[in-house]
Amino acid sequence: MVERDHTEITVKRQANLLSVNRTSVYRPSKEQQESEENVQLMHRIDEIYMKHPYFGYRRMTNFLRDQGSEINRKRVRRLMQLMGLEAIYPKPNLSKRLHAKYTRPYLLRGLTIDRPNQVWGIDITYLRMGKGFMYLFNIIDWYSRKVIDYELSSTLEKGFVMRCLKRAFSRCKPEIMNSDQGSHFTNADYLDLLEKEGVKVSMDGKGRATDNSRTERYFRSLKYECIFLNEFEDPRALRKGIARYVQFYNQDRPHQSLNGDKPCQFYAQNVEKIAS
């Protein structure tokens, strides 16, 4: 989030602009204290997970061992938790016991999505770098597949999600916001913001692959078409690479589900239809 080697804006000024405590900028986050060996292992886990999202930590451990890695399940489980990865398959929703007052039902089952800003999907994914990793929060309009907004962070602190949402809401709002049941979305601050903005809250069933499929497909395209093809060494390079890809994806990349239209073009045309 804050770039310490920025030559035009001091770290103190960046912290003030982002409304974060300057001492937390200088203090290494727990995520970024991982050893180089663990970071490289996380990169490998990310690649495997993109191909086999139904792998939990046990199957991931066995897969890595078959490839020659001497690793135990406890380590793989911790790293997958750090990366925000969870096996995708229907299973008992044990989280409701702990977060019952913050979880919400899935509102999209059987719903025809036929206009822009009807449903936005949000999620967070792990992004590899040559020297570490970052997290990407993304907002997608499900009808047009347009990336509405996004934000990168070096930690999983909740602030970067809220900043991005507030920025997006300053331009337009969805009728329904769909997310998973992660801690960034099952908390009072997130739910209060959406209630204040008049946005209905929808949450995926725990571990159900199809509930957030459009957002997951975007992450898959981003990683295979951008992240895995480029070795972004540091946050500045990654930010530039993501910005280029989002512009390409929104404005130049034909989308099969849109009959070859580009997301920005399709979004604008249909917003204009509704307005007229």
Image: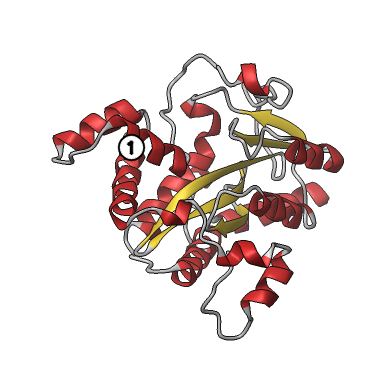
**Percent coordinates x, y for residue 230 in the rendering:** 34, 64
Measuring 31% from the left and 57% from the top, which residue is drawn there? 36
* Position of the N terminus by quadrant: bottom right
Vertical side of 7 occupied by 90: above or below = above
Residue receiving disc 1: 75
Measuring 66% from the left and 25% from the top, which residue is drawn there? 111
Q: Is any atom of residue 217 visible in this view?
A: yes
Q: For this view, does 267 lie left or right of residue 192?
A: left
**Percent coordinates x, y for residue 101 in the rendering:** 74, 22
Q: Is any atom of residue 110 visible in this view?
A: no
**Percent coordinates x, y for residue 61 in the rendering:** 26, 32
Residue 58, quarter of picture: top left
**Percent coordinates x, y for residue 261 in the rendering:** 53, 54
Q: Alpha-carbon neighbours of circle 1 within 10 Å: few (<14), some, or many (≥20)?
A: few
Measuring 58% from the left and 34% from the top, which residue is drawn there? 182
Q: Nearer the viewer, residue 147 or 269?
A: 147
Measuring 56% from the left and 48% from the top, which residue is drawn there? 156
Please count the marks in the image: 1
Vertical side of 276 occupied by 123: above or below = above
Q: For this view, does 50 lie left or right of residue 268?
A: left
Q: For this view, does 180 lie left or right of residue 169?
A: left
Which residue is situated farthest in the top direction here? Answer: 92
Identify residue type, mark 1.
Arg
Q: Nearer the viewer, residue 190 or 179?
A: 190
Q: For this view, does 24 lie left or right of residue 39?
A: right
